[in-house]
Amino acid sequence: MGNGTHENEYGFQTRAVHTGNDVDGETGAIKRPITMANSYELPYDPTDVNWSSAAGNLYTRNGGSNQKYLQEKLASLEGGEDCIVLASGVAALSGLFFALLESGDHVIFSSVTYIAVYRLLNELFNNKFQVETTIVDTSDLDAVRRAIRPNTKLIHIETPGNPTLTISDIKAIADIAHKNGALLSVDNTFASPFNQRPIELGADFTIESLTKYINGHGDAMGGAIIGKTEYLDVIRAQSQINLGATISPFNAWLIMRGSVTLPLRMRQHNENAMRVARWLQDLPCVSFVAYPGLESHQGHEIATRQMAPGFGGVLSFGLKSDHDTNNRFVSSLNVITSAVSLGHDESLIVFLGENDERQYLYPKEFHNGFFRMSVGIEDVEDIIEDLSQALKKVGLL
Ligand SMILES: *Cc1c(COP(=O)(O)O)cnc(C)c1O
C-alpha cells in the first residue's frame, strides 16, 4: 500500500498493518527505515526558516520522519484528524495540559486516574499556575454537571480508570463538556483503540500511553495525543518543541512495529482477562474482582456500549487475606511477574497496599490492599494454573 491509503474505508486490522508504512524511495525496501539523524538538510537560503516550526523535516525535536509515520497510523486507528507522539504517556498528558490550561481556568478530572494526572493537575498546575481543579467521580454524571463552573476549560477522564477499572460514560460527558463550552480529553490507555475510540464518541482528545498495549511488548516507552489539527498545532508549538519530550526515532519505529499486531493481541488479552476474571470471581478466598466485562461490575452496561469488542486485559481483585500473605502470594507466582506497567505481552501483577494516598477516592473494597493484574497473551490455562498453585501455596485454596 502506498501513500494516501489510510482512509477509513479500510478495516482496523488493515490499517494496523499498512498505515504509515510505504516503499522506501531510496532503496525500494518495503519497510520504511529508521532515521536516527538529529537534523535534516536546510534549503539553499535558510534565513526565513522558523526554527520552532513542526512543519517539514528540520530537527528531530520538532518532529522527525519515524514520529510522523507513527502519528499517521495512530490518528487513523483512533478515528482522529491528527496525532502527536511524544516520549511517554505522561509527556502526552503534561503536553496537553500545558498547552490548553491558563491561570484562572478550571479543570475537572476523574477521581481515579494515573497518578501523574493527580500530581500534575491537583498539585503542580494548581499550586504553580493557579489552575482551579475539581476531582470528581466521573462515573456519576450528576456530579460532573454539578462541578462545572463558568471557567471550566477541560474535563479529563480515564475510562477504565487505573487502578479501580471505574467506567465513565464518554458520550454523556462529551455532551456535558460541549454544552458548557469545555473540552473533553480521555485517557484511553486501558482500552486501546481496538476496544474503544473516544473521539468517535465525542471526545476532543484521546491520550494513549504507547508504552502499554499499542507497543505491546514492554520494551519501548511513548505517548500520543490524538485530536483536531487546530488544537494539536498549538500543542506541537507550545509543548512538543519547547518542553522537549521528544520520542526517540528508534522507539517510534519499535512502537510502529509492535502496533501491527495490536488487533490480534487485544483479542487474546480480552479473552484471557475475561476467563481469569470469571475464574477468580468464583473463588471463596477472593473478596472482589473489578473487571468491566463482568455483569457484576458497576459500569458493565456502559462498558458494553462504548467498549466493543472487548474489555481489555487489566483487572483488579482482593483476597480475604492479610498483608504478609498477599506478598507471599505474589512471590509464589512463576508465570506472572511482579512489576508495574500493563499491556505487555506477559502477565504482570502489582500488590497495592493499604496506605495509598488516594485510597479515599476509591470504592471501599479497595481499602484493604488489592492486586492490579495485567493479563498477558500466554495460554490462559497456564495463567490460571499459576494463580491456583500460588493460592494453594499460601493456604488460601
Ligand atoms: C502508564 C499509564 C500512563 C503513563 O504512561 P507512561 O508511558 O508510563 O508515561 C498514563 N495513563 C495510564 C492510564 C497509564 O496506565
Image: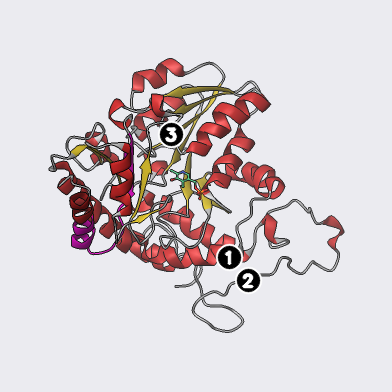
In the rendered view, would you say 211 is above or below 127?
below
Report the amino acid beneath label 3: Ile
Q: Which mark is residue 66?
A: 1
Position of residue 365 in the picture relative to residue 106 (left or right): left
Q: Can I make out residue 312 in this image?
A: no
Q: How is the image coloured?
A: secondary structure
Residues at circles 2 and 1 in contact by the CB criterion of under 8 Å: yes
The residue lying at 65 percent from left, 28 percent from top is 102
Q: Say what amino acid the circle numbered 2 marks.
A: Thr
Q: Residues within 10 Å of mark 1 (few under 14, many from 20)?
A: many
> How packed is label 3: few (under 14 Cα within 10 Å), some, or many (20 or more)?
many
Q: Give x and y (percent) for residue 288.
A: 22, 36
Left or right relative to 278: residue 52 = right
Q: Is residue 60 above or below residue 201?
A: below
Q: Quadrant where the N terminus lies?
A: bottom left
Q: Which residue is mark 3?
A: 157
| Residue mark closest to the camera, 3 vs 1 | 3
Q: Position of residue 64 (x, y in %)?
A: 64, 62
Kindly report the distance in space between the C-alpha atoms of the residues bearing marks 2 and 1.
7 Å
Is residue 381 magenta-colored?
Answer: yes
Q: Position of residue 385 (x, y in %)?
A: 19, 58
- Whole-percent x, y for residue 166 in the image: 33, 34
Instruction: State yes or no: residue 195 in magenta.
Output: no
Q: For the residue labelled by badge 3, is the local secondary structure a helix, a strand or a loop? A: strand
Q: Which residues are magenta?
A: 369-386
Which residue lies under the disc numbered 2?
35
Pick the residue in front: 316 or 71. Answer: 316
